[in-house]
Image (cartoon, rainbow, N blue to C red):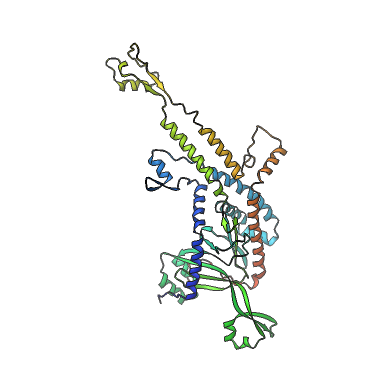
Amino acid sequence: MSDYLISQEGLEAVEMATGCWNACDDFRRQRARNKDYTFGRQWGDRIFVDGAEMTEFDYIRREGGIPFTNNLIRRVVRSVVGVSRSRVREKLEARDEEGRRHDLDNRMEELYARTMEEFLISGMAVHKKSVAGGEVKTRAVSPGRFFHDPQARDSRGSDLTLLGEVHVMPAASFCATFARDRDDYRRLRAVYGDGGMVRVFELWRRERRERRLCHDRSRGRLLKVDEELWLRRPALRRMPSRWILDDVWRYCFVTSHGEILRQGDSPYGCHPYVVKAYPFLDGEIHSYVGDIIDQQRYTNRLITMYDWVMRASAKGVLLFPEDALPEHTDMQMVMDEWSRFNGVITYRSKPGQPLPQQVSGNNSNLGIGELLAIQLKMMEDVSGVNGALQGKLERGSVSGELYNRQTENSLISLHDILMSYESFIDDAFTLESRLRRVRPNLSDPSPTWSARPPGLRC
């Protein structure tokens, strides 16, 4: 009752999923770093100092400095997302009535904006389509939980043969979601318990399976059945048939132990994911944010260095010769008088002795300001987001025509990534149309996460 229902097929599915997951490990690390920089955690890179590993933040604090952050990346990302929102809104308004109803029910305008943010940060956008209650539903999938075939090279995704995601859910919700009946629910509870978390792999694989194409003359239709099923069913064997090698997408929900929870042919004829990776040249993913991290790092370093120099330089230091102290006066009295408003300091002057004087360091010619201006300009050049795109005017006033031309020119460098994201939206529209066509006879395999055991009414 408490044993895992492990099968060889389940173990092979886990092995394939684990292999794809491990192949995406570098991408997930880079995504986490890009996300940290986007949201202001910009001193977390690990370095080695005198053989000890620490973060840059810890090193600067250890040396007595203050790690300053001037988050330019977040401003750039917001600007690009704002441009994308206006373009996406035009696409959504041009849809038919059923498409607009889907967009309204799923709040797609907001979802596409947040997905664009993810696309800029990680270089990947993933949505999953499903059918619930007779309607097409859309869910955003975190690329941090997503995996795919590492051998894929086509930026359109046509050569993908395996993809999926990892679900991590409470044990109680897991049992209620995947139990087929009350007995199975009790078995799952005995195995996985009520506490803790359970990991489930959701795989969609493109396979070639041996099948029979049978002609059911009584109903006037063609049937595709597995070769094993055809051999076991005399009624099928009496039908005219021929052997075929069928190219089919199949789904599988399997636990990390190798227990298959659900599996079968895709009811859509394809996988339910909409995936866009950028630029996916030779299978490599490079994000928009990753291109401007170096400028952000150097900007932070210059600001921190400037603060360090200012704090370490002399600012109003008093040089007072000890021989110039009058009688019945000590240096503490001189210090108190020096720091007091309208204070008067008496001293004993001698021939050839230097007078008390104030010393202040000159930090104006270090060149840090010029270097900082260069980095800010390079940030605009690399990101493609300049003042015109942010609504800033270089001069006091310009004509509306000139301003519009500057804005259009600033979009040229962003045109590629914006069009790439819009192709992702076009793919989403195509998949939605496909799901709507098969919807009347659809048995959707995607589970609806539930915390309620089967057979109980609320």
Front-lying residue, 136 or 332: 332
Q: Position of residue 391 (x, y in %)?
A: 63, 40
Q: Determine whether 333 is above or below 239 in the image.
A: above
Q: Position of residue 360 (x, y in %)?
A: 43, 24
The quadrant where residue 394 appears: top right
State the residue at coordinates (49%, 31%).
Answer: 366
Task: Tell which residue pokes out farthest to the top in this image.
Answer: 351
Task: Tell which residue pokes out farthest to the right in this image.
Answer: 401
The quadrant where residue 161 appears: bottom right
State the residue at coordinates (54%, 49%).
Answer: 290
Left/right placement of residue 22 relative to residue 278 reads left
Could one spot residue 457 in this view of the protein? no
Quadrant the N terminus occupies: bottom left
State the residue at coordinates (35%, 12%).
Answer: 352
Front-lying residue, 173 or 422: 422
Q: Determine whether 340 is above or below 279 in the image.
A: above
Q: Determine whether 61 is above or below 333 in the image.
A: below
Q: Position of residue 334 (x, y in %)?
A: 33, 20
State the residue at coordinates (64%, 73%).
Answer: 441
